[in-house]
Image: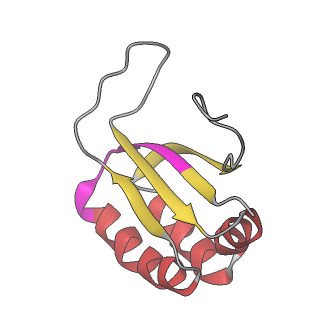
Amino acid sequence: MPKAYWIGHVDVNNPEGYKAYVAANAEPFRKYGARFLVRGGQFENPEGSTRSRNVVLEFKDYATALACYNSPEYQHAITLRTPHSVGDIIIVEGYDGVQPGDS
């Protein structure tokens, strides 16, 4: 079963207020086994549009990624995030098939 990912693009307009969201998301991320693959960091945007912060979280599977997002704990965290930021989050199933160069 392929892993799944949250891909977030966020502009934080109040870093101090955003800290409450970061503290609140720790519990659902731990509970659902989320693992940060990207958390801010340097980036280039050669095509399209983006936001100032990029985040990629890995989950064991698609159902777990959805359950985390829909959990009461994460829904509460959203209420702490939205006054202090604007963003886009997608939840996507990973690819577990043939790769370039595979026989």
Q: Quadrant of the N terminus?
A: bottom right
The quadrant holding residue 10 is top left
Q: Is residue 73 above or below residue 89?
A: below
Q: Position of residue 63 (x, y in %)?
A: 77, 69
Chief SS of the magenta region: strand
Residue 2 among magenta residues:
no
Which residue is rendered at x = 46% and y = 61% of the image? 81
Q: Is residue 9 above or below residue 21?
A: above
Q: How is the image coloured?
A: secondary structure
Q: Is residue 61 above or below residue 27?
A: above
Tell me where the magenta segment starts and ends, as one range. Answer: 7-16
- The residue closer to the viewer here, 102 or 70, is 102
Q: Residue furthest top?
A: 47
Q: Is residue 55 visible?
A: yes
Q: Quadrant of the C terminus?
A: top right
Would you say 94 lies left or right of 22 here?
Answer: right
Q: Position of residue 27 (x, y in %)?
A: 47, 85
Which residue is rendered at x = 53% and y = 79% of the image? 33
Which residue is rendered at x = 37% and y = 20% of the image? 45
Which residue is rendered at x = 70% and y = 58% of the image? 2
